[in-house]
Image (cartoon, grey):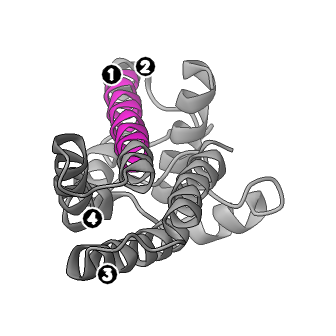
Amino acid sequence: MKFETLLRRESQNLTAERLGQSLGANRSRRAGLNSRPAIRPMGEQGRAAACQFIPNSSGHVPFQGRAELIERLGETVKEMVARNQSRNEAFAQATKTASAIATSSDLNAVDAKEAVDTFWKLYWGELARFEGQDVETAMVRFGRSLQTWQATGKKPEEMAQLSLAVSHACRNEIDAYDK
């Protein structure tokens, strides 16, 4: 998405908030086009800072506030891009880790031990920041099967299918967010 488009959408959101219109109404109008808003609303600090950009009677932001508005919107876009990259990296790592575990025949191998450690770190930490219901469900199922393997020493037959489910859930969530 082009920076100008993001800038225009964010400034429309700011104008709507300042004029007292609810973001819920804006989201419901966009619901037919997209299940997720292209730009998420700012937090309280962002709203408070945006209040200084009061539109004049014609609905335009005064010239002296535009440069700062553009700068802040640029920072917001950079933060969104960084968050998207972090999410994509976490999902890619979860997919690779689940695949490495599922294709291993022995959990005591060095690569398998590293993959198991990475899986649990993702499971209890980084991935929780981004995962939706489908990724969470796939990770829980894979984790339970992994626990069974660790407890019994026998590899469950469904490990490959559960690894594939993690991969599909991650891909679907990335695709849904990027729409």
Q: Are marks 1 and 3 in contact (CB under 8 Å)?
A: no
Q: Residue beneath label 3, please?
A: 148
Q: Is residue 122 left or right of residue 55?
A: left
Is 105 situated left or right of 17 in this image? left
Q: From the image, state whether disc 1 or disc 3 is nearer to you.
A: 3
Give the overall secondary structure of the magenta segment.
helix
Q: Which residue is mark 1?
A: 71
In whole angstroms, how far apart are the C-alphas of marks 1 and 4? 36 Å
Quarter of the image with the C terminus is: top right
Q: Earlier in the sequence, mark 1 or mark 4?
A: 1
Q: Tell me which numbered mark, 2 or 1, is placed earlier along the sequence.
A: 2
Tag on residue 63?
2
Name the residue beneath numbered marker 4: 123
Amino acid type assigned to the residue bearing label 1 in the image: Glu
Q: Marks 2 and 3: which is nearer the front?
A: 3
Distance CA(mark 1)–CA(mark 3): 52 Å
Q: Where 19 sits versus 90, above or below? A: below
Residue 88, percent from left and from top? 43, 39
